[in-house]
Image: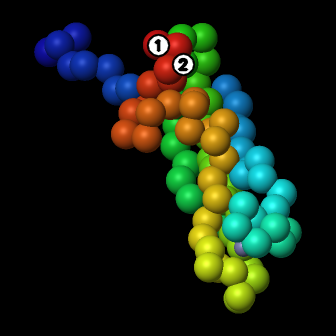
Amino acid sequence: MNHLRRKPKNLVVNKRIIYKCELENCLTCGESLYLCRHYSWSKTVQQLDQVIHVASQPKECQNPKCCDFGKRYVSAVAQTIALPSSTYGLDV
Ligand SMILES: [Zn+2]
């Protein structure tokens, strides 16, 4: 009965992309933003022609006097790759 078994989803990642926050400076205080050492999210995205692994690396304001101190800025471009809850690219 082997032929009735469904084949496992076999996704081969074609490339990995890490998007960093596009902003250089805090929008509130203007100080330089620091790149965080972790990713805010990462996932595998199926597009029409390829499978990619996308990660988003945020930056944060480290000026203690800023009211946005510790606020994380994420890459706007990364959000356009796939919807937050979806693993399919927007072109699918
Ligand atoms: Zn700031």
Q: Is residue 12 visible?
A: no
Q: Position of residue 55 (x, y in %)?
A: 63, 47
Coloration mode? rainbow
Quick one: label 1, few (<14), some, or many (20+) residues within 10 Å? few
Q: Quadrant of the N terminus?
A: top left
Q: Amino acid at mark 1?
A: Val
**Of the pair 81 and 26, the residue shown nearer to us:** 26
Q: What residue sits 71% from the left and 45% below the top?
A: 19
Pointer 2 residue: 47
Q: What residue sits 56% from the left and 38% below the top?
A: 79
Secondary structure type for disc 1:
loop
Tell me if label 2 and label 1 are in contact, CB under 8 Å.
yes
Q: Is residue 53 left or right of residue 7?
A: right
Q: Is residue 87 left or right of residue 73?
A: left
Q: Is mark 1 within 8 Å of ligand 1?
A: no
Q: Amino acid at mark 2?
A: Gln
Q: Position of residue 66 (x, y in %)?
A: 69, 81
Examine the rendered structure and indicate whether residue 21 appears above or below residue 69: above
**Of the pair 75 and 2, the residue shown nearer to us:** 75
Q: Position of residue 86 (x, y in %)?
A: 39, 33
**Of the pair 26 and 8, the residue shown nearer to us:** 26
**Of the pair 36 and 29, the residue shown nearer to us:** 29
Secondary structure type for disc 2:
loop
Pointer 1 residue: 92
